[in-house]
Image (cartoon, rainbow, N blue to C red):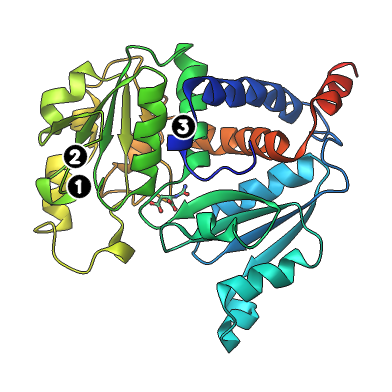
Amino acid sequence: MANLLSIADLPRDDIESILDLTDHFAEVNRRPIPKVPALRGRTVVSLFYEDSTRTRLSFETAAKRLGADTMTFTVGSSSVKKGESLRDTIQTIDAFGVHAFVVRHKSSGVPHQVTRWTDAAVVNAGDGWHEHPTQALLDTYTIRERFGALDGRHIAIVGDINHSRVARSDVAAFTALGARVTLVGPPTFLPPSLVGWPVDVSFDLDEVIESLDVCYLLRIQQERIDEALIPSLREYTAGYGLTTRRAARLREDALIMHPGPMNRGVEIAPEVADEPRSVITQQVANGVAVRMAVLFRLLGSESQLESMEQR
Ligand code: NCD
C-alpha cells in the first residue's frame, strides 16, 4: 500500500489485514509504556485545512507511539494566509524530507492531488463529502471487536448521509466485510442517486430500530449545507434522533456509535451517548491503534514487526 486515499480502493483482504495489525497495536497501547520504535527516523506531517479534534490528535498520537517525528501544519498560522498554493505548500514541506502527509481538506480529491506533488505516502484524513477511510477502519474495528465479524450484521447509518464522508467510507467498509447497511434519514439528507450504493434505505427509524446490531448516528453537517433541508432541529430529533424512547427499543446487545463531534440532544440524547451500549469513546481509543496500523503499513517494514513481537 503506497497511500490510503479511499476505502473503495481496498479489497476485503486488505481491510482485514489492517484490522489484524490493529490488534497488535491495540496490545501495544495497553502496555505501561505504549511505545514501539517501529517508525524511528520517519517524519509524519499532519496537514489540516479543516477543523479537527479527534482525527488530528489521534494521528499524531499514533505517529509518536511508533517513534516517528511529527510536524503539524495548521492553515490559520501558515503562509496559506499569504496566498501560497497547495502545491507550493506541499513541495515546501516535502523539501524538509518527510515520509507521510496526513491530509484533511474541505474539497474532495485533494489528498489524491497531493500524491502527484510528493513521493511521500499520503493518508486521507477526510476530504469534503468524499471519504474518511481511517474513520471507517476504526468503526469496522470497533464492531468486529464486539461481534467477532461483520458478516450478516445489520447496521443503520442514520442522519445527514449526503454530506457525510464518514457515511461513504463506512458503507464501503461495512459492506466489504459482509454487513447489511440501511441508510436512514429524511429524503433531503439522502444522496440524490443511490446508484452504486450497496444499501437499503428507510425514511423511518422506528421501522428498523429493533432489527439493528449497530445504530450509527451522524451529525448534521451544517458547514456543508446552505439551504433549509429540515423544518427544524426539534422535528429532526423527533423523527431521527436516538432518543431514550427509541434506544429502549434497540436490542440489549446492539452498539450505539457516532464518529464525533456529537450534538447532544439533536441526533443523540445525552443519556444515550453515555449508556453502556454506546461505544463512542471506544471508537476514539481504537482510532489510535488503527492509525498506528495504517502508518506502519505505509512506512514500516515486516522485519521490524517481527523483531517487535520477539521482545
Ligand atoms: C467527522 C469528520 O470530520 O468527517 N468527524 C471525525 O473525523 N471523527 C464527522 C463530522 O464532522 O461530523
Looking at the picture, does residue 79 appear above or below residue 158?
Answer: below
Looking at the picture, does residue 46 appear above or below residue 293?
Answer: below
**Sequence-first tag of 2 and 3:** 3
Left or right placement of residue 118 versus residue 300 in this view: left
Front position among marks 2 and 3: 2
Q: Which mark is residue 276?
A: none
Left or right placement of residue 136 versus residue 188 in this view: right
Describe the element under mark 3 as helix, strand or loop.
helix
Q: Mark 2 = which residue? A: 194
Q: How far apart are the alpha carbons under marks 3 and 1? A: 21 Å
Estimate the x, y position of residue 82 in percent, counting from the top left.
59, 88
The furthest residue to the front: 116
Estimate the x, y position of residue 239 in percent, counting from the top left.
12, 42
Q: Mark 1 = which residue? A: 191
Quarter of the image where one finds residue 218: top left
What amino acid does circle 2 point to?
Answer: Leu
Quarter of the image where one finds residue 201: top left
The furthest residue to the bottom: 82
The residue carrying pointer 3 sits among few (fewer than 14), some (14 to 19) or many (20 or more) residues within 10 Å by Cα, namely: many
Q: Residue at position x 75%, y 52% from top?
A: 99
Left or right placement of residue 307 versus residue 181 in this view: right
Describe the element under mark 2 as helix, strand or loop.
loop
Describe the element under mark 1 as helix, strand or loop.
loop
Q: Mark 3 = which residue? A: 139
Left or right placement of residue 183 versus residue 107 in this view: left
Q: Residue at position x 63%, y 79% from top?
A: 77
Classify the position of the C terminus by image quarter.
top right
Q: How many marks?
A: 3
Q: How far apart are the alpha carbons under marks 2 and 1? A: 6 Å
What amino acid does circle 1 point to?
Answer: Pro
Q: Are marks 2 and 1 in contact (CB under 8 Å)?
A: yes
